[in-house]
Amino acid sequence: MKKTVLLLILALGVQTTFAVAIERVTSSTIRFYNFSQNNFSLAGAQITVGTQVHEVNSLTIKKSGPLDVPAGGRIEFSGFTFGASASIALWYPGTFPGTPTAGQMASFMQYGVGGGPYEALAVSAGLWSTGAFVAGAPPFIRDGNYSTWDAGNWGQGLQVEEPLALPTLKVYPSVFTNSITIEIAQQTLKSVELIDATGKVCTSKQGAWNKELKIATDNLQNGVYLFRGQTLSGEWITQRLIKN
């Protein structure tokens, strides 16, 4: 399914383009990931679990911090209780009360069974396929591919109740020409990729690196890129880079 770039209406009435997705779900938490090049604010946004509406402003943030999420950043909310199946959606501010539309939905996933209450809107928004669902029970994690949107992007595993921790990692230069260098300490990277401003994965490598990795970038066009690296423990590390 085609990637959808979303518009979030901020409290000040200013529109800003961003791409945000539900990234992982545990038995009691939902984590969101901003894979765009823009900051966004979740202030005033709403989350539905089934038909129950949760106001983001009143939820508990698992990792303390503001509702403003920078490019490549994450925010995780706790206090949910998920059973054998659930349908989860993120909505723009002011969607409820009222009748929601596909254009007001920012992200969606469902597990255990298809046909959730807002599945049809998710399909219309390009965020899901009719009748699709993720099999099994939480925890679930996205595969890191944000160019497609479906149950196939999700899998079980990754015990994520532990605090979010990033390994020591340095990616340089931040403004690059022919190559970038990744210095790694404490953990091992198993995959790396460079994503352009449209969400396309331009470079992708799999392996096992625990010291240093160099990536040639001669074939990349000038512009803004998002570096993403995944550790053996399943955490994603991101950094914004520019080719000039």
Image (cartoon, grey):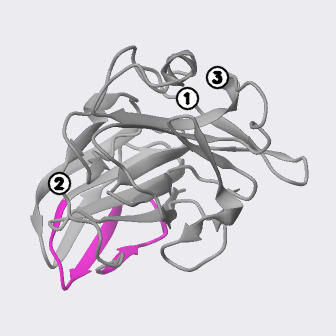
Q: Is residue 94 left or right of residue 56?
A: right
Q: List x then y, in percent, for residue 58.
A: 68, 64
Q: Amino acid at mark 3?
A: Ala
Mark 2 or mark 3, earlier in chain: 3
- Is residue 227 at least partly visible in the picture? yes
Q: Amino acid at mark 2?
A: Gly
Q: Amino acid at mark 1?
A: Thr
Quickly name the residue at label 1. 4
Tag 3's secondary structure?
helix
Q: Residue at x 50, y 35 (%)?
A: 50
Q: List x then y, in percent, for residue 37.
A: 59, 53
Q: Is residue 143 left or right of residue 208?
A: right
Q: List x then y, in percent, for residue 241.
A: 49, 61
Tell me the magenta residue range.
Answer: 168-190
Quickly name the residue at label 2. 157
Crowding around mark 2 (Cα neighbors within 10 Å: few <14, some 14 to 19, many 20+) is few
Looking at the image, which is closer to me, 73 or 202?
73
Which labelled disc corresponds to residue 102? Answer: 3
Tag 2's secondary structure?
loop
Q: Residue at x 19, y 75 (%)?
A: 212
Q: Is residue 208 left or right of residue 234?
A: left
Tag 1's secondary structure?
loop
Magenta-span inclusion, residue 225 = no
